[in-house]
Every structure is written in C-alpha cells, then in structure tokens.
Image: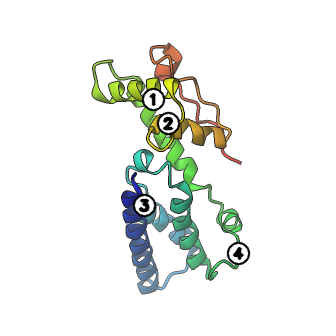
Amino acid sequence: MYRKEMTAAKTKARKAIGKVKEVLRKGRTCNWETIEKLFEPIVISTLLYEAKIWSLRYLKEIETVQTIYFRQMLGVSGDEVNSTLIRNECQRLKLTFDIMKEAAGMVKKIMNMTDDRYPKIVLKTLIEMDNRNPNHKDWNWVIQLKSKFTELEIEVLDLSDTNHPDNRTHFNTSQKPR
C-alpha cells in the first residue's frame, strides 16, 4: 500500500536533485548555505508532499534521498561513508522526524474538528480498530503512527479517548529522536 506513491516521490526528488545540481553548476556556486537552502524548498517539498499520510511504511527508503543529495554535494561516492555520518556532518535530522511532526500536527488538527467531520470519523474508526485488534499494522495508519513514535521513544497520549480534552489539544512532539 502506497509503494507507488513512495516510488514516484523518490523519482521526482531525484529529478529535483538533478535540477539543483544544474542550478549550482550554472551559477558556479559551491556555497554550502546555498546548497542547504535549495534542498528544503526544492527536494524536500517534492519528496515529502503529503508524506504524513503515505510514508510511514517507507521511512527508510525516503531517508535515502537526503543521504544521496548530501553525498553528492559533499563529493562522497557510493557507500564510502555511513549515512549517519553524512547527516551529522551536514547537521541534519532524519527526515523521519519532519514526517512524524507533520503527522502529529494532522492528528491534532483532526482531533479538534467536530465529531461530524469525515476526517474525525475516519480517525476515530482507525483508533477503535487499533483498540480491538492492533495486529493490522500494514493497513491501519494509527497503528503505524503509534509504532513509529514508540520506535523514536516519543511519548504519545492514548488516543482511544477521542473526547478527552488533552487528546483534542495536545500531541507531544517535543522530544527529538536519538
């Protein structure tokens, strides 16, 4: 599910990387600040368009695009250097953190909707399904989201009480991944 979207997003992002490299070459610039500034609006926006919905199962594959971009900009070929070292050198967090923050914001927005809105009805249904049978990780977005937050050791409120005031206004994303 959503593999097609992930593949399309990665393909578009790789094309965007090519365009950024072309702009840098034509502009004859190798200013690191420019390289970073072009990454956000061009490559990231292309790669992560609506990723909060489709990407939870493909975070590792998505992360490779950031690594590819910065490897190329640093002139590092192949797998000579670990992706963690590339991120550290470039002072970048994993894209997973951005995606999870967006997903948490979407949950918060939906939880603040009135109960008759379709997004809230769907979210409540997914939460109820999770409470009944949490084994369908491949098909339930809420289970995937909770699982990823647990992996990142980020505290998440219990969403099963969708009418609880804290669940309507608070979804803790203040902790950063290790």
Mark 2 highlights which residue?
104
* x, y percent for residue 60: 57, 58
Three-letter amino acid code of the residue under disc 4 = Val
Q: What residue type is labelled 1?
A: Lys
Residues under numbered marks 1 and 2 in contact, where contact means CB atoms less than 8 Å apart: yes
Could you tell me how far apart the alpha carbons at marks 1 and 2 are, in whole angstroms? Answer: 6 Å
Asked where in the image residue 25 lies, by quadrant, the reply is bottom left
- Comes first in the chain, label 2 or label 4: 4
Q: Find residue 134 and report its horizontal and vertical position in percent.
A: 54, 31
Tag 4 residue: 81
Q: Residue 47 carries which label?
A: 3
Dot 1 crowding, Cα within 10 Å, few <14, some 14–19, many 20+: some
* Three-letter code, disc 3: Leu
Rendered view: 145 above or below 166: below
- Is 65 rendered above or below residue 168? below
- The circle drawn on residue 108 is 1
Answer with mark 1 or mark 4, whichever residue precedes in sequence: 4
Sequence-wise first label, 1 or 3: 3
Q: Do callouts 3 and 4 mark residues in contact (Cβ within 8 Å)?
A: no
Nearer to the camera, 30 or 8: 8
The residue under the point 66% across, 67% down is: 83
